[in-house]
């Protein structure tokens, strides 16, 4: 039974990790050092690249995320913090009347997509990027199309799979974001709309280098004279909290950190306020809904990654709607309570002492 309880804990911690992975597009594999920015560029551009490398590596010393991942999330966070509008309807298609921060986060993550300036390119590819040679592939088009699909999928998850308020709890308690989407309207000169019409490799390369710049974050790092580049800076502290939230929620800090995030999400209300306790049934229910949401998003993501002629296959979200009160869930609640009782009585149990409190029959205190 103790083995079953340990497996159940690990599975619950995995649910939140899978949801974040599929929502944000983060790899479950940690590649600690991805280096080698390309470029036959001016000394100014080289200096800028060197500053960026130093900035990213300074973050890599504190967060178990790879260089390319850190760069991506700095860019996404900057878009959220600056309340940058999503691409226009002409570029991305009509947007829902109201957007949650989770859906906006997923959209920006997908718009960044597979862009990675740290991949070494062959000399032939570098030469190709410096010419006006016509290319048959514009990656911006695919990224924006996928962003539209991602936005629709997250909206379906929030409306039909996750309980009311859970999306906001994930943003605040798991990912450490306190920002709110302001519904800022796209500008008349939408850069994405213009970029979709680019046909030469040189033009596309120049657009990507400019559009996916993280210079604002790098400049803040340079202006700091402290050991930590983000001391006493609210926006930068928000970035720190975000990177830490991603690291823990995606399993990079271990399953115990992920489980703590799951508890935080389960013990918060719709406004993000947390309680010191959570009903065991709420923890199991949260994990159950996260598992279904992650499975649905995984199917959607796999469909997006198919060749262009294979896209359009429908993923039925109805197959992932949570059941009202499945018997298996009640069994897991009972197992969790039994484990907590043994720990309270000094039995310890596998996985350490989580300090469950039994002021209420089915209420558990936060893990130590």
Image (cartoon, rainbow, N blue to C red):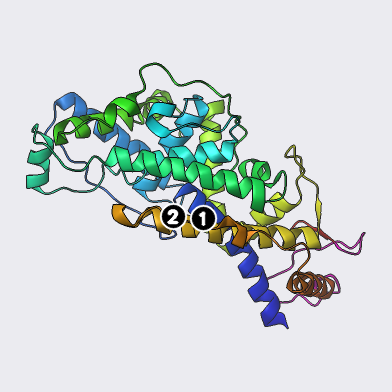
Residue drawn 7% across and 46% down? 124
Crowdedness of circle 1 by 10 Å Cα count: few (<14), some, many (20+)? many
Q: Verify whether residue 261 appears in magenta.
A: no
| Residue 40 location, quadrant | top left
Return the residue at label 1: 297
State the image coordinates of residue 166 (x, y, percent, origin top left): 69, 47
- Closer-to-camera residue (181/366): 181
Q: Kindly check if marks 1 and 2 are in contact, taking CB atoms under 8 A apart as contact.
A: yes
Query: SS of the residue at dot 2?
Result: helix
Q: Quadrant of the N terminus?
A: bottom right
SS class, disc 1? helix
C-alpha span from label 1 to label 2:
6 Å
- Asked whether residue 366 appears in the rendered view, the answer is yes
Q: Is residue 253 visible?
A: no
Q: Is residue 345 magenta?
A: yes
- Disc 2 marks which residue? 301
Question: For the view shown, which residue lies furthest in the bottom direction?
Answer: 1
Secondary structure mainly formed by the magenta segment: loop
Q: Position of residue 228 (x, y in %)?
A: 47, 35
Residue visible at 55% across and 46% down in the picture: 154
Q: Is residue 46 left or right of residue 236?
A: left
* For residue 292, above or below residue 136: below
What are the residue bounds of the magenta stretch? Answer: 343-362
The quadrant of the picture occupied by the C terminus is: bottom right
Nearer the observer, 23 or 326? 326
Give 131 or 266, whichever is nearer the viewer. Answer: 131
Q: Residue at x 43, y 26 (%)?
A: 224
Report x, y in % for residue 182.
58, 24
């Amino acid at each position: 039974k103790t083995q079953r309880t340990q497996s159940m804990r690990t599975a619950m911690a995995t649910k939140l990790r899978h949801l974040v992975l599929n929502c944000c597009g983060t790899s479950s594999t940690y590649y600690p050092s991805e280096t080698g920015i390309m470029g036959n560029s001016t000394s100014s551009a080289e200096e800028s690249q060197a500053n960026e490398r130093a900035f990213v590596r300074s973050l890599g010393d504190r967060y178990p995320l790879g260089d390319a991942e850190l760069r991506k999330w700095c860019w996404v966070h900057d878009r959220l913090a600056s309340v940058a509008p999503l691409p226009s309807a002409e570029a991305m298609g009509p947007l829902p009347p109201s957007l949650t921060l989770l859906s906006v986060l997923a959209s920006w993550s997908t718009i960044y997509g597979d862009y990675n300036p740290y991949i070494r390119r062959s000399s032939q590819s570098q030469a190709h990027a410096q010419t006006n040679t016509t290319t048959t592939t514009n990656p911006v088009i695919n990224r924006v199309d996928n962003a539209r699909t991602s936005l629709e999928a997250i909206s379906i998850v929030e409306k039909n799979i996750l309980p009311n308020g859970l999306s906001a709890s994930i943003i605040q308690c798991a990912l450490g974001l306190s920002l709110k989407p302001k519904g800022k309207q796209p500008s008349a000169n939408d850069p994405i709309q213009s970029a979709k019409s680019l046909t030469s490799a040189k033009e596309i390369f120049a657009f990507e280098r400019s559009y996916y710049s993280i210079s604002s974050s790098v400049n803040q790092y340079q202006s700091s004279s402290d050991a930590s580049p983000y001391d006493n800076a609210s926006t930068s502290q928000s970035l720190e909290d975000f990177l830490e939230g991603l690291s823990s929620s995606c399993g990079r800090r271990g399953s115990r950190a992920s489980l703590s995030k799951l508890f935080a999400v389960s013990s918060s209300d719709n406004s993000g306020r947390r309680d010191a306790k959570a009903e065991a049934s709420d923890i199991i229910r949260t994990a159950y809904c996260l598992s279904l949401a992650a499975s649905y998003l995984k199917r959607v993501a796999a469909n997006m990654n198919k060749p262009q002629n294979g896209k359009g296959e429908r993923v039925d979200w109805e197959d992932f709607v949570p059941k009202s009160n499945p018997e298996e869930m009640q069994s897991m609640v009972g197992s969790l309570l039994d484990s907590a009782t043994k720990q309270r009585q000094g039995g310890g149990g596998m996985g350490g002492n989580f300090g469950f409190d039994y002021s209420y029959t089915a209420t558990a205190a936060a893990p130590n």
